[in-house]
Every structure is written in C-alpha cells, then in structure tokens.
Amino acid sequence: MNYTVNASILLTELPITERPAAVRAAGFDAVEFWWPFSSAVPAQEEIDAFVAAIQDAGVQLTGLNFFAGDMPTGDRGLVSWIGREDEFRANVEVVVAIGERLGTKAFNALYGNRIEGVDAQVQDDLAVQNLAIAGAAVAKIGGIVLLEPVSGMDAYPLKTAADALAIIARVADEHGVDNVKLLADFYHLAVNGDDVAAVVADHAAEFGHIQIADAPGRGEPGTGDLPLAQWIADAQAGGYAGPIGLEYKATQADPFAWIQN
C-alpha cells in the first residue's frame, strides 16, 4: 500500500521540522502537511527550514494545505471568506513556490465556514473564483487543488461528496479550470452520514486524494468500525492510483503498529 503520513495530526510530540525525519524512520517515504505556518505569508527563513526538513529526511511532500486561518479556534479555510481575498491569493503564491521546490502536486484548499450575516451565495461565488485562481496557479507546476468535505464544524458547508463536487463543477463550467478535485476523506464523509461506498463506486477515478481514519473516534484503522480496507480496495479497482493519506489521531505509542497487524 502506498501511504503518505499526515504529519500535522501524527507525530505532534515533535517540532514540525523533526517530523519528516520521524516519518522516514518509521519506514515511509511520503509525507503531507496542513499549512505548517502561523500566517499566510511566513518569513522566508521559516519556509526554507520547512523545505530543508523535507529534503534532508529524504521524503516526498505529496500534499500541502493552503493557509486555513486559525484552525485551533475554529477557522476552516479562506476560500469563501469575504474580506480575506488578498490574503488567500498571496498564500497561493507561497504554496506554489513551495510546491515547485519540493515537487508537490496536491494542494488542499479548505473551503471556509459560513459567515454570519453574509449571503451564502456570495461566499460560494467567491469560493469558485478563488478555487479557479488557485487551480490555474498550481497547474503551472503540474498540480491539482483538492476540495474536502469536513465534519465536526457545523458552519462548514461542504459536508458530503456531492456538496464538494457541485462546487468543483462550477469552477470548471464558469472558469474552465479542471484541476480542482475531490479529496475523499473517508472519515469525514462517514461521520457526516454520506454513503461512502456509493461515492467510491461513482467517483473513484475522479478522486484527487484519499485520506483515512476510523470512526468513531478518528483513530487509526481498526479502532472503529469503518470498512476502510474495502473502500480503499474498491477505489483502487475503480481507478484511483494515488497514495492513501494517514490522517488519524494515534491511540497508542506506535501510531503505525496497525499496519503490521
């Protein structure tokens, strides 16, 4: 199995710049991160240290999130956030530069929460525009933008695969940008009540990325009751050929022990 370790949710006892080496030491050659900086446009020294950590560890950065705001306080992306357009677009430039240096091809754009007092249609129109800008930018380095349904945040409007696919279709139809793809996080989809087996059956070949965690609990596979192995096998049979992102909360000292079981 071709796994990529999300080192923003795993190995969090280590500083960010030490996690790529820990991923390599655990036997993996690929890593992905949420945005690893506290601002949309970090200092060049911070960027260089992150890039060097990836390169020195000898792992491939397969995925990187765009800046999503202050996630610990509940922010979930700037894509649809009225008033932060310039910040998002400045971040796109930084993301592309990092991707170009590291050969990264997949970039996750969290959609953003609904804003009280702002018309949802206005937010969606901005999101479509921003996703088109991001898609065109990463296309220059052969990349794709990922759009993800998310659980656990009532104000986040994309909860099912259909929600995300509708926005993706608008980006293609209205702007001619066709490299925005569904991030199929099986945990989020399942927790939100989506029919994951049907999503896999209908859209596996269109997936831009797969991430996994078990439910309930968001622990490693085997800690819950989701048929993750079956969904992965079905997705691969249906045409998905990319890595499987490990994006779960470890419940034991060795977060990867389940792979040997």
Image (spheres, grey):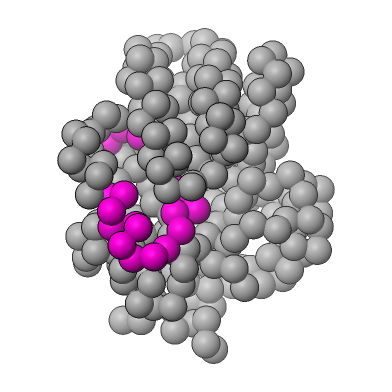
Seen in the picture, residue 1 relative to 120 is either above or below; the reply is below
Horizontal relation, residue 187 to residue 57: left or right: right
Q: Is residue 88 visible?
A: no
Does the magenta portion include 224?
A: no
The outermost residue toward the bottom is 261
Residues rendered magenta in the picture? 50-70
Q: Is residue 25 above or below residue 33?
A: below
Q: Position of residue 234 (x, y in %)?
A: 77, 64
The quarter of the image holding the C terminus is bottom right
Q: Residue at x 60, y 55 (%)?
A: 210
Observer-nearest of 68 and 175: 175
Q: In the drawing, does residue 32 fall left or right of residue 143? A: left
Q: Image check: 253 left or right of 200?
A: left
Whether 58 is drawn above or below 70: the answer is: below
**Which residue shows up at 66% across the image and 23% down it?**
177
Decide if residue 117 is in sight here: yes
